[in-house]
Image (spheres, rainbow, N blue to C red):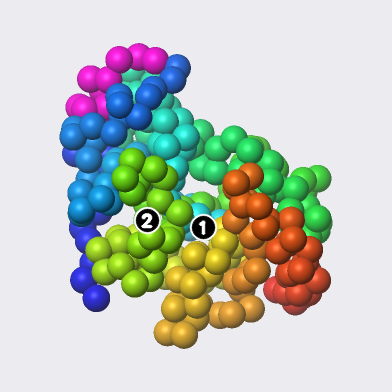
Amino acid sequence: MMKKNLPTLEKYLESIKNLPVKSKYTKEELLVPELLVERDGQIELYYAAHNESFNTKAKVFMIGITPGFAQMEKSIIACKKAIEEEKTLSEIPYICKKEGRFAGTLRRNISTMLDELELNKYLELESTMELFEMRDDLLHTTSLIPFPTFVKGKNYTGHSPELIKNEQLMAYVRANMDRQVDMLQEALYIPMGRCVEEVLKIYISEGKLREEQCLIGFPHPSGANVNRKKQFDEEKEQMMFKITQFYL
């Protein structure tokens, strides 16, 4: 399978620098040619900096499908501010990551479920919400596709087209994930939904990940996922057992 060469902040620095200073952006302001990574038919990928930051010492690795527009907006706002403050190219991706990763209600939904699974106790935290705050030294996050991806202008959900059957998108997944799987061999992998699970199962089948380190069954945390609570209740017992075994 082909891999993509992933563009970095340096390529888009001037375009972000030239954006107006704002506390909110519209799609019309950010989904522009200057920030376009690639267009393939109705699929468009745009740049955001936050998935360029890596924590190779993380104990927990949370993986989404792709940043949505809300994450892109937060990431770009943080990037623009950091540029204005003359932060270095190496500093900016982490600053963006702190703002952009699983922003908004996603964080609350993730931490609520993980606390119910008692992961916080094994990490010696009051709540797993601390992973997004003062204890982010324990956390690494990414998206399978590191760049905000849209189909017909709407957030890509991993379906239509089906991710693992789309060669172009999987080329981005491989370019992004192969190196991170190599970096984080001892972390607990938490896939956000079934689409991410399918990709992790590929790595398991290739012997690059162990099934026991992947929290298969964890629901996608979006409020739009109407089956989230039902799936969580159905999978809760086996996930708690897996966490217990992982930390033995």
Q: Nearer the viewer, residue 134 or 120?
A: 120
User: Does residue 169 sit above or below 107 in this rendering?
Assistant: below
Magenta-colored stretch includes residue 198: no
Q: Quadrant of the C terminus?
A: bottom right
- 45 sits left or right of 180 in the view: left
Residue position marked by numbered label 1 in the rendering: 63
Name the spot of residue 111 as percent of width and height, x first: 70, 48
Q: Given contact means CB atoms under 8 Å apart, are the residues at marks 1 and 2 in contact?
A: no
Residue position marked by numbered label 2 in the rendering: 145
**Label for residue 212?**
none
What is the three-letter code of the residue carrying label 2?
A: Ile
Farthest top residue? 21
- 96 sits left or right of 113 in the view: left
Residue range of the region highlighted in magenta in the rendering = 12-22
Which residue lies at the image location 50% right of the left edge and 77% below the top edge? 201
Q: Which SS class for mark 1? A: strand
